Image (spheres, grey):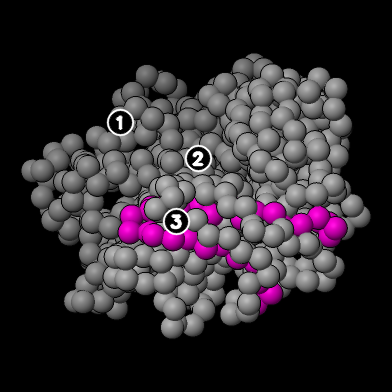
Amino acid sequence: MHPDFINQYHITMKNLLLTLIFLCGFSALYAADGITLGYCNGQVVRQGKVTVDGEATVSAAILLTADMLAPYVGNSVAAIRVGLAARTNIDKVSVWVRQSLDGTDLASATITTDAGEIERGWNEIDLAQPYDIVANQPLYIGYTYEQRGTSSAISLIDGTTAGAFFFKESATSAWADRANEGILSVEAVIAGDNIVTYDMEMLSAEGSYDNSGNIVLTTTLHNSGAKDIEGFQLTTTIGDQMEQINTTFTNLITKGETTTVNFTISPTTADAGRKHKLTLALTELASGNVTDEVPENDALQVTMTYPRKVLIEEFTGEKCTNCPRAAKFLHEVLAQGEFATTTVMTAHHSGYLPDWLTFRPTDIDYEWFYNHTTQIYAPAMMVDRYPYEETSEGTTYYTPCFNPGTKAIIIERLSEALQRKTNAYINAEATLTADKTGLNVTINGGRTSAEVNYPSRLTVFIVEDHIPQRNQVSLDTYPEFEHMGVLRAVNDTWGEPIQWTGDEFNATYTFNFDADWEQENLRVVAFISDYDANDPAKCVVHNCEQVTMTDVMAAVNTAETKAQVESETYYSIDGKQISNPQQKGILLQRQKLTDGTVVVRKIKN
């Protein structure tokens, strides 16, 4: 079985074959005289993707497998619905049922333009003689139209699944399986006594967080039965029955209708949607007055998307003429609106010429991201290491690196990144080591999608801001220039493979301070990303987080206020004790607290 056949579409039925059939990916909907069966979920497009030039006899079809038809044995195919993206130059449309694409018609019917029967959109055509569905017999459901000139009549909706699109461009050409191009808008109308009356089917369930921490849920529902349904209840279950929230709707969903509803819940359970998964279920129809005959398709685990912080990685250097200008652009952009709180900036001193701030080997190794044998440059930037198409010397390649030549391109790339949904979250904490000579860093996170495993890597940077330049060229373009986000330490250049426990992980690191670092200007930056050693375009960042030394010291100061100062001494920068704490210059203040803690601070008079 083709793997895409498993995931894409939906069905309805009411016998013991339902569970098996549900894995096969088709849709069963209501029509005027029965249920429709196909892959397109009742959708038709208004812009055709397939164009055939000149006069031609064009055919298209789908395959309904024996398993898909098994619940309807004893009923019959009474009509065929054909969705047309256009009717220009179409004179006649014939629908048919066959056992093979080139086989004889088991049942058929025709409509014509002359009779005013062909419509753009859906055309439901009754067969001259209904065809009885029998066990173990697959059927091709299709149509053939004659065009007198170029036409783009075939309606294909987005998606791929086996059996969803076969195409024959002319009367003399061979049939081609083109299911990779889309899903054909064709459905069989099944009539008879063995038809589901009430069936509301849940097609999707997604969740996200709003600015207040509430969970916004979106679900798409389809009335796959033969009767209208007025009103329904959705129940959100958090974890293993830790909390249940009922939400009631009064919507009328007519036979065959697909609808999407959005609503907000405010769980009391901590970490709802993160550590504790959500399940959404249809638990009542029409105020309890009717029973859903196919309860197996009434519930889904909610796929959560999480607030995203965007990782910016700048390639720069003191010998780079245009780097101060790019740094100014970035500084101005990051001061704007949401970018100030949703972006994390870092820098690599490479791409052009290394300098005294180049962190080796990582900064140099990252030139691999340019994905070009000779063309590397600075300034350059990466935004979540997302790849973009570039062309050089006639060769097209994909690279996360781009030239930040204008503020507009930076804003464009950041805005695009913030719009991309992420199925991963990450939290970062940092505390001083017991001897205050380094940082203990704790990272935890989670995922709600198997997409976050390609394989997932965790990278942790220590970066430093506000480093004065030494020999930076082109300062006239940005006189206030200083080096920001300079890489000082990393757990591993390419990140360490995440050790998932289910859909969660936890990792700890210790980084020791270097004497050259200004500790108050340090930040911890952590991010989850893909990694493919053979392809820089497959290393996309899923989410990131940062901790500033301001955050770290705030926690330290809070803890210290709980203990009183027992003694206090002062020292010069070379370690000699002094008696005058007002002495000019840089001093070291040593405090011993009543809880035994010793705190050393650098102060400047």
The range drawn in magenta is 71-100
Q: Nearer the viewer, mark 2 or mark 3?
A: 3
The tag earlier along the polypeptide, 1 or 2, is 2
Q: Position of residue 142 (x, y in %)?
A: 57, 65
Identify which amino acid the numbered label 2 is placed on: Arg
Identify which amino acid the numbered label 1 is placed on: Ala
Identify which amino acid the numbered label 3 is placed on: Thr
Relative to 124, 156 lies left or right: left
Q: Residues within 10 Å of mark 1 (few under 14, many from 20)?
A: few
Q: Is residue 454 visible?
A: no
In the picture of the structure, the residue carrying the numbered disc 3 is 112
- Which residue is painted at 66% across and 29% down in the image? 253
Distance, label 3 to label 1, CA atoms, is: 63 Å
Q: Is residue 421 visible?
A: yes
Q: Residues within 10 Å of mark 2 (few under 14, many from 20)?
A: many
Distance, label 2 to label 3, CA atoms, is: 54 Å
In the picture of the structure, the residue carrying the numbered disc 2 is 308
Say which quadrant the N terminus sits in. Answer: bottom right
Label 1 residue SS: loop
Relative to 85, 282 lies left or right: right
In the picture of the structure, the residue carrying the numbered disc 1 is 335
Judging depth in this view, the residue of 13 and 419 nearest the camera is 13
Label 3 residue SS: strand
Q: Position of residue 291 (x, y in %)?
A: 86, 31
Judging depth in this view, the residue of 433 and 373 nearest the camera is 373
Distance, label 1 to label 2, CA atoms, is: 18 Å
Q: Residues within 10 Å of mark 3 (few under 14, many from 20)?
A: some
